[in-house]
Structures are given as C-alpha cells and as structure tokens.
Image (cartoon, grey):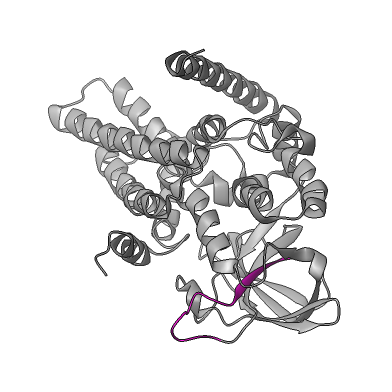
Amino acid sequence: MNSFDALCANDTELAELRVSIREFLHADRAKFDWHPAVDSWLSCWDEDFSKRLGDAGFLGLTIPTRYGGRGLGHLHRYVVTEELLAQGAPVAAHWVADRQLAPALLAYGNEKQRQRLLPKIAAGRCYSAIGMSEPGAGSDLAAVQTKATRTGGGWLLKGTKVWTSGAHRAHQIVVLARTSPVDPAHRHAGLSQFLVPCDSPGVTISPVVLMSGEHHFNEVIFDDVFVPDADVLGEIGDGWRQVTSELSFERSGPERFLSTAPLIIAAVRELANRPEVDDHIAAAVGELMAQLISLRQLSVSVARALADGQQVANQAALVKDLGTQFEQESVDLVANLLGDASPDPALQALLRAGRLHRPLFTLRGGTNEVLRSVVARGMGLR
C-alpha cells in the first residue's frame, strides 16, 4: 500500500469512527436524558457516562492494547473528542486523565504506573486533576513555590495549588513541584512531577466556588505529604520538559474552540427556522462558521504533528490563543444575533452558561498574554 492509499484508508476509518460515536451519543442521550452543555469538559461531571463511554471503546484510543486501550492514533482521538464537544456531552470526569495523564504515562511513566493506571483510564474509571497553578505563580510555572524535599524512600510535598479543576472528585492529582533550589539563570530547571492520591494524609481540598454557585475549581494544600519514589512521574528535575509536552495536548485540542459549540449550533438552528433572516445576520453567521472552520484546520494540523511525534508547543499555544478568543467572541455574537430573548428555554440556558464561563476561556491553560510570549520566544522574537 503506497502512502496515498494509506491516507485514504485512514480517512475512511476516521469517517466510520465518527459515525460510530455519533450513533453512540444519540442513543445514550435518548436513554439517559443528558442535555448539551457549554463548557461540558469542565462543568459536566458524570462518572456513569464516562464508564459507558469507556465500555463502548471510545476512551483510551491512543493507549496501546496491552494496557486496555485501542492502540489508535491522535487523529482517532481527535474525531471522538470533536463529536463529544460538539454535542456538549458530560465528559468532565475522565477528561484530564484521558487528555493529559495517559500521554504523560506513555511518555514518561514507569511500567508499574502504566499497568496500574492506563487500563482504568481506558475504562473511564480513573479521574485525575492537574496541580500546576499557584496563588503567587498563576501562568508563570517557573515561579512554582511548592517544594518536594527528599526523605527516606520518597519525598515530602509542601505547598498550595489553586484552580485545580475537579480535585474534589478526582482520585489523584499530578503535582508540579520544585525539587532543587531556584537557579536564576535557569528558572525552568529543578522541577519534577508527582502522582498524589487525593486521600493522602496531609492533602486538604477546599472549594473555589463560582458566583453562580458552581463548584469546579479548588485550592489544594499539601502539608508534608509523603510521596513514595514509585509515584514520581518521569525523571526528577525534568518536570518542565514533561509539562511543556503535556500542555501541547491541553492547548491544541478542539476543546479550545468548541466549548461554545452547543450554543452556536442551537442558535444557528433557531435562526434558520425564523421566517425572515436578513443579509446582516446571514453574513455574521457565515463569518462565525468561517472562523470555526479555520480554527479547526489549525487544530487538526497540530494533531497530525503530535501523531508524527513532533514538538508543537508554539503551534499549540497559537491554537489556544486564537481559539479561546473565538469562544469569548462567539458568546457575544450569538447574543447579538438572537436579539431579544429566544423562545427556546434550552437555548436561553446555553447562553446564560456561555456568559458565565466566558471570562474563563482565555485564562485556563495559560493566559493568552503568556501564550503570546511563548509564541514570540519560539519565533526568536524575544
């Protein structure tokens, strides 16, 4: 089979996978009565849905079969992720484990960690959080103050993480900590990652509640938490390189421009059913969809590069920057297009959620200002 034949075969396989996940979601929604949501990968925690998704073979797609996964590629996972987000499915429970922890384990984890965790991730039964941001560090991960101090058989972890999504429900937190003193000339050196069970002695998880009353974020305090050597993720001192690699998956996926997709889709459907749609509205909808398609092409190109094992930190940062700006703008545009209140209560609920989550889009995963610095540095401009 030549390369062209292989490409065509892969496209056919991806198309069949897309049909399969759409059929699964249609049947699952009809049976279990969940509703499309804006920002579903943050706001909709449903462990039963994650288990059903895993049982159906739609999780752990890039995990090798020997660890319970499907042994497929990044583009297969991209197709499934895209459909889940477009339909606003309740994916928050398994999200971090499948998106970030699994690739990190495959790249840096030891064999015991892989055997222990990867089958659970593929089954939709492992829920993880990421401990990166801190009260005094924010998006500047080189300023991390959480420390891990060597002790007999392991490490003592002390410090505070904040904005830790889902930590109050997760099984474990992947914590970035400093394992050697700060070197002013090499600020990114001396960082390491640890797998910390949420029920470890010394771990205190406190809610950070949104003004709506929703609880997704947390402050997590580590007070001399013992972490055995077996739970070090990767190599001591190599945390910055590992985290940068993980962030490529976090920043470049379709969640960076499809968080508001259920709102956009519902709004366009309502506008299409109105008796009169003027040229201004038609042009605005066309521009909105053109932006969405362009962002998708950029995101897919990063997914292809990840599939080829390339380093794409700059491209991933660009997807996140442009995509989250689009998400914010799409909420305002939809509100303007709908004019007065929509008669559809489901659409009204989506718009309310979009307005509430709008400020978050350009903050999480690194602020857009920080991302632009990453891109500028990668281009040799600073």
Q: Is residue 342 visible?
A: no
Residue at 53% x, 79% y: name it.
135
Looking at the rendering, in which quadrant would you find the C terminus? bottom left
Q: Where is residue 318 in the image (x, y as percent from the top left)?
A: 34, 52
Q: What stretch is highlighted in magenta?
A: 182-198
Q: Nearer the viewer, residue 276 or 88?
A: 88
Q: Nearer the viewer, residue 293 or 175?
A: 175
Q: Relative to 15, does residue 320 appear above or below in the rendering?
A: below
Q: Where is residue 224 in the image (x, y as percent from the top left)?
A: 77, 83
In this rendering, position of residue 201 left or right of residue 279? right
Q: Relative to 273, does residue 216 appear above or below in the rendering?
A: below
Q: Can residue 165 be seen in this view?
A: yes
Residue at 54% x, 78% y: name it.
144
In this rendering, position of residue 4 left or right of residue 219? left
Report the residue that reaches farthest toward the front.
2
Residue at 33% x, 60% y: name it.
378
Is-magenta flag for residue 286? no
In this rendering, position of residue 246 left or right of residue 370? right
Q: Relative to 284, does residue 110 appear above or below in the rendering?
A: below
Q: Position of residue 131 (x, y in %)?
A: 62, 67
Report the residue that reaches farthest toward the left.
279
Residue at 47% x, 79% y: name it.
187
Total tally of numbered discs in the picture: 0
Is-magenta flag for residue 189? yes
For residue 29, which quarter of the picture?
A: top right
